[in-house]
Amino acid sequence: MASFSSHGVLLVSLVGLLVLVLCGTGEAQSNQDCCLSYTKVRLPRWALKGYSEQLSSEVCDIHAIIFHTRSGLHACVNPREAWVKKHLLFLSQKLKKMST
C-alpha cells in the first residue's frame, strides 16, 4: 500500500473541492451555453489554462468571464471583481510570454 504525503492529500482534497464547487450554478458547458450566475469561489491561478468572454450585448443576459480550468471545467465569474481582473492580467502576460 502506498503512503501519501500530507501535501498530496491536501492537493487531492483541494482539487476535489474545486470540482464540486464548479459543478454548481455558475457553470457554462460550452460557448453556446450562457452563464446565468457567477460562481462565488475564487479560483486559484494554477488551476486556470485560459478564458473566454460572454457579452451581455449578445445572446446572454449577463456579462461574464468564463475561466477554463486544467481539469476541463468552465467557471462563470464576475468580470468586475478585483481577483478576476488580476487573473486575466496573469493569463494575458502568460500568453504574451508564450508568443515571444
Image (cartoon, grey):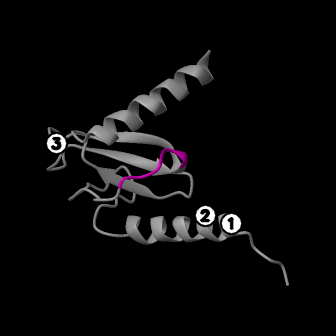
Q: Quadrant of residue 39?
A: bottom left
Q: Which residue is mark 1?
A: 8
Residue 76 position in % (x across, y down): 31, 53
Residue ID at (39%, 68%): 21
Crowd around label 2: few <14 · some 14–19 · many ≥20 (10 Å): few
What's the residue type where badge 3 is placed?
Ser
Among all residues in the image, which is located at the extreme front?
Answer: 6
Is residue 87 or residue 70 the one in the foreground?
87
Is residue 1 or residue 39 the one in the foreground?
1
Residue ID at (18%, 46%): 59
What's the magenta region?
Answer: 42-46
- When the figure is inspected, residue 100 is found, relative to residue 43, above or below; the finding is above
User: In terms of secondary structure, what is the magenta stretch mainly?
Assistant: loop
Q: Secondary structure at mark 3?
A: loop
Q: Nearer the viewer, mark 3 or mark 1?
A: 1
Sequence-wise, the earlier of marks 2 and 3 is: 2
